[in-house]
Amino acid sequence: MQQWQKYLAEVLGTFILVLIGTMAIVGVDTAVGADGGLGLVMATVPLAFGFALLAGLYAFGEVSGGHFNPAVTLAMFVDRRASVSDLIGYWIAQVAGALLGSLTLMWMTNSDAVEATVNGYGGNGAGTGWISEVVLTAIFVMVILQVTRSSTMSNQGFVAIPLTLVAIHYAGIPFSGASVNPARSIGPALVSGDDRAISELWVYLLAPLVGALVGWIVWKVVVQGDTDFRDDGAAIKDAATS
């Protein structure tokens, strides 16, 4: 498999995730109004993001590994399943795919519709948004690390991972908008140009990356029984400087 195929797969997989997920949000707003549809959002949008991830995984997962999320790629990097060049290349591809997804939505609708799809912690405050994104991303990453490594569960990954994302959205939408994916947050925020979303974007850039590291550490200790991280640190340092 050539590198350009992997990067293009990440662009397209992230595009599918962001476009279908955010189209569902706009569809709910159109059907019931932006102020009265939280119940319908909670009922439908998590499934849209989960099914969108499922579609992306079936379409492109065998090409790139189906990360479609910078936090997932970071976890794979620290677990020595991705190189530093792939870390950078995947991140660029994922952001490009998310921007393309939001731009496509804007072409179909308008910038106000894209603005309705941005992540936000609202009246909960940055602290609540931060904790929600860290914890939920950690859970997501732990599931991915295990099902992609386990010999008994590897054939369940294409179902287990999207279902975990569905659960995360059901839990996290009221607290942080349930991003757990920096690319998913970057696309709508930048395309809509929403000042609030851009000012809050730091939470959705940093918290999922922290959550990915937390998830990897917990998985290494509890599942792998590895409490000595010196060899991992040396390997990561060598990969980053090579």
Image: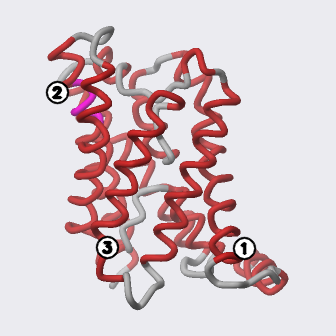
* Location of residue 115 in the rendering, given as x and y in whole percent from the top left corner: 38, 20
Mark positioned earlier in the residue sequence (1 or 2): 2
In this rendering, the label closer to the viewer, 3 or 2: 2
**Label 1: which residue?**
240
Viewer-side residue, 113 vs 131: 131
Answer left or right for 83 relative to 6: right
* The image quarter in which residue 71 lies: bottom right
Q: How packed is label 2: few (under 14 Cα within 10 Å), some, or many (20 or more)?
A: few
Characterize the magenta stretch by its predominant secondary structure: helix
Q: Which residue is mark 2?
A: 108
Q: Would you identify the image quadrant in which residue 152 lies?
A: bottom left
* Dot 1 amino acid type: Ala
The amino acid at mark 2 is Met
Image x and y of residue 160, in percent: 34, 66
Q: Is residue 95 visible?
A: yes
Give the number of callouts: 3
User: What is the distance, in whole Å, between disc 1 and disc 3 at their CAs?
Assistant: 23 Å
Mark pair 1, 2: CA separation: 41 Å
Q: Give the residue displayed 43% in from the left and 76% down from the top.
A: 147
Q: Position of residue 191 (x, y in %)?
A: 40, 28
The tag on residue 5 is 3
Q: CA distance from mark 3 to mark 2?
A: 28 Å
Mark 1 nearby-residue class (10 Å; few <14, some 14–19, many ≥20): few
Magenta stretch encompasses residue 25: yes
Check disc 3 and report its element: helix, strand or loop.
Answer: helix
What is the span of residues highlighted in magenta in the rendered image?
22-26
Which circle's residue, 1 or 3, is located before the other in the chain?
3
As drawn, 233 above or below 21: below
Instruction: Give the amino acid type for the residue marked by disc 3 in the picture.
Output: Gln
Task: Report whether 191 appears left or right of 87.
Answer: left
Dot 3 alpha-carbon crowd within 10 angstroms: few under 14, some 14 to 19, many 20 or more: few
